[in-house]
Structures are given as C-alpha cells and as structure tokens.
Image (cartoon, rainbow, N blue to C red):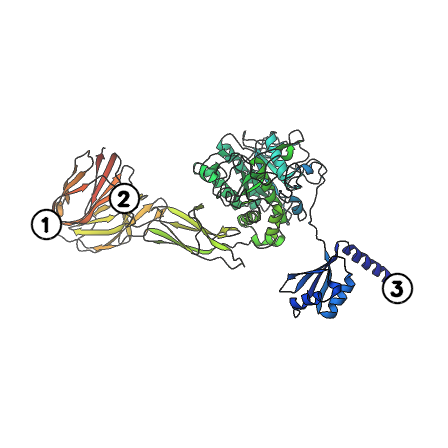
Amino acid sequence: MKRLLFFIILILMSTFLFCDDNNTIPGAYIVQFDKSITHKQINKYIDNHDQFNKLKCRPLSVRMNIWSIYSNDAYNSLDIESDFRKEFKVIYFQKEHLVKLREVIPNDPQFSMQWALKNIGDNGGIADADIDATEAWDTVTGGTTANNRQIVIAVIDDGFDLNHPDLNFCKNTAEIPGNNTDDDNNGYIDDYDGWNAYNHSGSITPNSHGTHVTGICGALGNNSQGVCGVNFNVKVLPVQGSSGTESIVVEAYSYVYEMRMRYNESNGQHGAYIVVTNSSFGVDYGNPVNYPIWCSLYDSLGAAGVLSCAATANASINVDEQYDMPTACNSDYLITLTNTTRTDEKYASAGYGLTTIDLGAPGTQIRSTDMNSGYSNKTGTSMSSPHAAGAVALLHAAVTDSLYNYFNTNYGALALYIKQSILSSTDSLPSLSGITVTGGRLNVKKAIDKLLSGQLILNPPINLRVELIANHLVLNWETPIENNQTNLTGYNVYRDNVLLNESLIGITEYSDFNIINGSQYTYSVKAVYQEGISEASNYVTYSIMLAPRNLVGTAYNNRISLSWQSPGFESSLLERNVSAYSVFRDGLFIHLNPPQDTIYIDNGVENGIEYTYYVTAMYSIGESQASNSVILTPQSSNNREDQLFKPITELSNYPNPFNPNTAIMFKLHRDGRVNIRIYNIKGNFVKEIADNRLIKGEHSISWDGRDYKGKQCRSGLYFYRIENDDFSIQRKMVLIK
C-alpha cells in the first residue's frame, strides 16, 4: 500500500513538473553563479570550449551575478548544467520560462467593438492604445470594496433608460416610490430611482446621452450581453441635471452630496457609498470666477469622499487661457478629461490645458448602451470622462482592508489617494505632452498597480501655526512625517479652501499680506509630491481684530477728554469693519461710541481722583484686545478756557467743489497733535495728509486729489476727518474733473 502511495505521489509530482515545463523556452536558461566567479572567467571558459560555441550569454544582474544563457541548437540542459557545475560554483540553474500578461476577456458579444478597453489595432487603430482594462480586470472587476461596501457612481446627465438590461442602477430602498412622501427624511420626495433636478422630483425620464455615458462607466460585464463597462458590477445613481440653468446643476450635485453624507454619518445605514460623479456637460468659455458655488461643490464632495470626473469642451481651446466650466475649476478633488482616439492622438475638437486638463481618455467612436435596450457609438469628451469615473470606482474595489484601515474615516484623503494613483500612472502620449497636466492617457491597470504598491501615502504637513506680525499674517508649519517618500517638491497654501500660491519650494513659511482688519480667515497647507498632493494639514482659523491705537487723554476740571486713532496697520492703514468702540474706566464699560467717533468726554468724574481708561474696537466677529491705557486725574481750575474750551473753529475747505486741489483751513486754539485723513464715499481710506504737532493759530493743509499710492482720484464725494487729543470732526467735499 505504501509503495502504491509512493508511485501516486511520484506521478502527481511528474505531472506538476510536466505542466510547469509547458511554458519553458527550449535552449534558454537562467544561471546564478557564486559572487566569487567573475564575468571574465565565465566568458573565457565558454570561448575555450568547442561544445559551447553556439551559446550566447548575457548578464542579467551584475551585482547578483545572474546570467541569461541561450543555445541555438537547444543544447541538452543536463549536459550544460553538469559542465557549468564542474567548473564553477553554481547557486541556481534553471530553464527560461514564458511569462504571459494576465487579462480577463469578458463574454459580452460586442466587447470586440470596445477598442477603448482593449485595442488590437483593427479599424485603423494602434494596438494597446487603450486603458488596459482587461489586464486590470485580472486584479479586480469592481462592484464592492474589500469591506463589503456597495460602490456607487453618480452620473449627472440628461436622462437614463432605467429598463436597460445591461445596466445596474442604484435604488434608494429607504424610500417608498410614488407615495408623495419623504420616507427617509433626506429632503427629497420619492427619490427611489434617483433625482430629477429638472422637475425637482424622483421621476427619472429616458434619454440617449445619459444612457450611453452610464454604460461606459459600468455596463454589466461578463454577462453574455451587449457591452462591458470599465467596472463590471458597479451600481449607478442616476441624477438628471446636466443642462438648462446653473441652479439645476447645483441641485443635482447637492443631491449626490446629501446621499454620501448620509452614508458617512450613519456608518452606511442610510444614503449611498458614492465614490465618484461623472459630468459630461459644461459651459464653453465659462470662467470659474463667475461660478463660485458650482466650483466649491467639488471641494465639499471631495471632503465627503467623492471625486468628480468632468469632460472638457468639444473644441480645440486652451482652457488655461479661454476657460471652461467645470474643467477650469480649481479643486483637488476634480479630475478633468480630454478626448483621445484609437490611434492615441488627441481628438482635434477637444480642449486642452497644461494646468487645467489632467489627462486624456478614449472618447472617439465609443461603443456603449443606448435607448430602448440598444447600443450605439458616440464621440466626444462626454465619452472620455466616464472612462475615468469607471476607473475611480474600479480602484475603490481594489483598495485593500489595510489601506481602508489606514485612511479610516478620512474619506477626503482616500479620494486624493485614488486620484493621484490615476494621475501618476498614465501612458505618456506625445499628443498630450505639454498641453495636459500628466501628458498622458488613462491606464487603469497601471493605476491599480500604483494604488497597491504602497508608494502613494502622501503625508500632509503638520503643526500649522498662524501669527500676526506688523501688517501681515505669517504661517509656519513642519515637514510631513517620514513615510519613505522622497519626492516632496513643495507646499500649497490655502485660505478658506482657495489656493493662495503656486508650489512653495524648500520653505515652510508663508506671509499673507492681503488681509483686512475685522476679518476671519481659515488656513491649511498641503504637501506637493511628484506623485500628487497630500490631504490638508491641521486647519487654523485666525480672527484679525486690531485694537484702537494711541489712546491719549487730558484732565480738566470735573471732566476728562479722551481720543484715539482707529485700528489699522501702520503701513497700509486698513481700518475697515469697525462697528463701534467701547470705552472702559477702571475696568468697567462706560460708553459705546459709533465707529466714526474717536473722541469721548467723560463728565462723570470727580476732581482729585485717579482714573484708568482704555478702549476696545467692536467687530462683527468679536471684540479686540484693549488699547494702551492712560491714567488721568481731573483737578479743579478757575481757567475759563478749560471750562469753555473749543479746540478748533473756522473749519472749511476751499475751493469746494474743486479740481484738482483744495485747502483744508481751520483755527487751532491750543498747541497739539492734528491728524487729517481723506475717505471716499464708501468709507475707504484714501490718504493721510497730516499727522503732526501744530502750534496754536490758523492753518491750511492742501490736498492734490491723489490717493496714498499717488494715483489721481475719480470725481465724486469725499470726506475729510480732522482729529487730535480733544476732538474729531468730519466734513464733506466734492472733486469734479
């Protein structure tokens, strides 16, 4: 019995060996010699032996002493191995094997027409001018994540054939269709099938374009029917809202955001695990400056874990210079696409942009699903974008448990990781070089390999700090935590989620001079790597509430006169947004001054008692720190001038109206500091024309109609304010050109 078992095992082993040798190359071997054996010894030995005169040798690794040996006449492997082992110390001697690409060819009958997924070079195409989908499917075909989340693509378009047998649409099972009730309390009535932003209902209507785009993203694969999507088993959330007015687009994206946020907040009990949106629509020449809400939606979606793919214009325009909505939007969570052909050229009528358009994807004569359960070919950037959206969903299916655990609930960071995996793994194309961000075309196989390589953990900067110094805010941060990442190239600084700079190289400090008193700003920093951009550092919110300046006072008989300068930076004199001034005596609030009044007379004091004063500025965002304090003691006096003192009289300007000069004239009844400033009708500072100590008497200060930068002011109404320790007076004047 034991002998029988031995022979069975021997037969099985022989079978395995035989099967393994089926992919060997006759006469080809790989040999690793001991490191003590030199290349010169090996070559000399071969040259000196006639039986080896048909051998070809080539080193594969000099460091490890591994060689490729090939015989034209298939020299017997046992003989050559024996000869080499007699002469040299051989570590390994093996046959050379064929290695084949792994790929999945689906059984969908029209798959051969989908050149974008596998291009064999027919119909005028170039072999492998595709996104390597079949190779990617050998790793994953999509549908669910490693932790069993159902992956959803939200397609925002003009309409959908919900009954197409080759499409897998998402259903909101928490909603009862047709009962005119918001059953799941998500703010949308009867959204069982999705949402129609055109008529603000859950009634999805059919249309060709949206059906075609949906099939590119995720037509059911390997189901012996029709075509195959980039993702075999993904679910698609249909959202109508791709044209008409901007408010329709905003409503459509807002529905997607609501459904993903509900998923995040309920730990998957409600909503949908939407990982990407597709937008095959837009506004030609649309400048993002005019669409701030639309553009900001991509950041909101991204922070929730949703990337957005967008098709650029179907016109050969430079989006960097001529703009396009939404592909000119500045969002880290937006992937922008142009159209490539089956010959790997940029389609002639397709937009481009070195800083705005990320990459290309097939978009010419693309086979996909269509109306009435049918199929058709369509061309346009509209067909390029869903290839990327499908790729995003496919990469989510490839994310491992450990990678999910690394990101945990930091959905925005995971979204950026997915995006950078795609952008850092394109196939370089000459037709896209220098006119797109990556210079390449989508390759989903390479993207999955990059994703799983562990090379893209892009740590953010840490310990961001913000400090007000003089007239600007200074940001400091520390370099990212070490992550074996050696391709850090710089940093991007953001204020209120808007990029303030191009990449800062080699420094960890940034100064923001474009600030306004009475404002609040939120800052963050991202690390820029060759492979992509990290998530944000810690966020720091800084409120600029400057205190009043140069508080001074004079004590009289039973009264104290206070005056101060309004808050501002000494160099730029920005004084906006003060809503009032609070006056404090001995630490207690005693009076509220309007913002234009920087003088206060305190009549509630007694002679011979010491009083301490300070002033604070009030803003819509809070209250400033205290000004400097002054200590004053009123004294009794028989001086009638103290009792009836009018510090300034005869204030006027001449001529008025004026062009180009006018003189501000007044009579000063006591030596003292005088400050004169000009403001426009909006209350904005124009120029300071005096700030010095003047002697008692008549004075005339001229203004030449120019602002503090030396530029000539426009015609209109202006104000001049004259103030010193005892008074603050404002008058009008008119400049006419």
Q: Earlier in the sequence, mark 1 or mark 2?
A: 1
Q: Position of residue 211 (x, y in %)?
A: 62, 33
| Extreme residue toward the right, this view | 1
Label for residue 639? 1
In this orientation, which residue lies closer to the viewer: 427 or 166? Answer: 427
Mark 1 residue element:
loop
Horizontal relation, residue 542 to residue 139: left or right: left
Quadrant that contains the N terminus: bottom right
Q: Are marks 1 and 2 in contact (CB under 8 Å)?
A: no
Above or below for 730 versus 455: above
Q: Which residue is mark 3?
A: 3
Mark 2 residue element:
loop
Horizontal relation, residue 639 to residue 81: left or right: left
Q: Which residue is mark 2?
A: 709
Label for residue 435? none
Disc 2 crowd rating (10 Å Cα; few below 14, some 14-19, many 20+) is few
In this orientation, which residue lies closer to the viewer: 437 or 459? Answer: 437
Above or below for 550 versus 196: below
Q: Position of residue 243 (x, y in %)?
A: 52, 31
In this orientation, which residue lies closer to the viewer: 261 or 514? Answer: 514
- Name the residue at 25% across, 48% down: 565
Q: Position of residue 574 (x, y in %)?
A: 30, 46
The answer to whether residue 170 is seen in the rendering is no
- Name the residue at 35% across, 44% down: 620
The answer to whether residue 626 is seen in the rendering is yes
Q: Are marks 1 and 3 in contact (CB under 8 Å)?
A: no
Q: Earlier in the sequence, mark 1 or mark 3?
A: 3
Type of amino acid under label 2: Lys
Type of amino acid under label 1: Asn
